[in-house]
Image: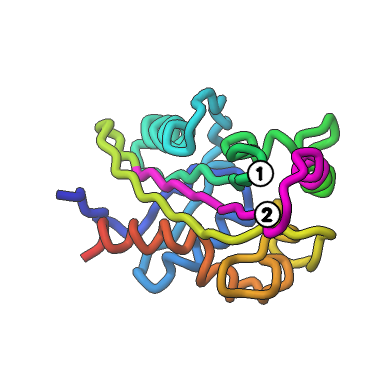
Amino acid sequence: MTRKFIGDRLLIATHNTGKLEEMAHLLKPYGVSVVGAAEMNLPEPEETETTFVGNARIKAHAAARATGLPALSDDSGLEIDALDGAPGVYTADWAETENGRDFAMAMTRAHREIEATGTPQPWTARFCCTLVLAWPDGHDEVFPGVMPGRVVWPMRGDQGHGYDPIFVPDGHQVTFAEMERWEKNRISHRARAVAQFVAGCFD
């Protein structure tokens, strides 16, 4: 039996403003207001696991312990079949530079490595999101969401964030970055994980 979320304020264990806005929008119909990790002056814990669920657990439990609030975290990334599932949990790491994250560089690397494998198109891939809701007493609930699709090149669109300009979701002809933002949020891997979370933790 999934533990229910009781309350109207939820800590989202992220320093990413894009993710925070997306979660606030997705949870608004349920009367839940959100607060981010940066607002609570929480440090970013080191993500040392090799799975989405492992890293999401690290972030959720650290935030719940530090604040005494239930904390929801997500770990997400892009798995490309031609690259044996890479970048996967290292999706953001591929974009790291001395001056912050450069996703154009990361997408260029992904395309270069796909080309090097000689894999013919379509380059199938999926965006994965795992949400973990942790309570201060150490209990947690896990909610996965997956959006299958394909990688395209060159980059297309200027909406969204991360690898959105090279990902076309199944059933669509445009990339996530060419979609109106709230349309993307309605169908994304994160939306699917949130739907599982809402079904499990809200009456």
The residue carrying mark 2 is 123
Q: Where is residue 148 in the image (x, y as percent from the top left)?
A: 53, 59
Q: Image point 60% across, 45% down: which residue?
A: 81
Q: In which quarter of the image is the C terminus?
A: bottom left
What label does residue 35 carry, if any?
none
Amino acid, disc 2: Trp
Q: Against 65, is 25 above or below?
A: below
CA–CA distance between discs 2 and 1? 7 Å
Can you tell which quarter of the image residue 142 is in?
top left
What's drawn in magenta, residue-wise?
Answer: 109-133
Of callouts 2 and 1, the N-terminal one = 1
Q: Examine the structure image and report whether residue 75 is included in the region drawn in magenta.
A: no
Q: Position of residue 24 (x, y in %)?
A: 50, 62
Residue 138 in view (yes/no): yes
Q: Against 50, is 192 above or below?
A: below
Q: Seen in the image, is 85 located left or right of residue 191?
A: right
Q: Seen in the image, is 138 located left or right of residue 10?
A: left
Q: Do the residues bearing badges 2 and 1 touch, measured as CB atoms within 8 Å? A: yes
Can you tell which quarter of the image residue 176 is in?
bottom right
Q: Image point 80% across, 45% down: which residue?
A: 115
The residue carrying mark 1 is 82
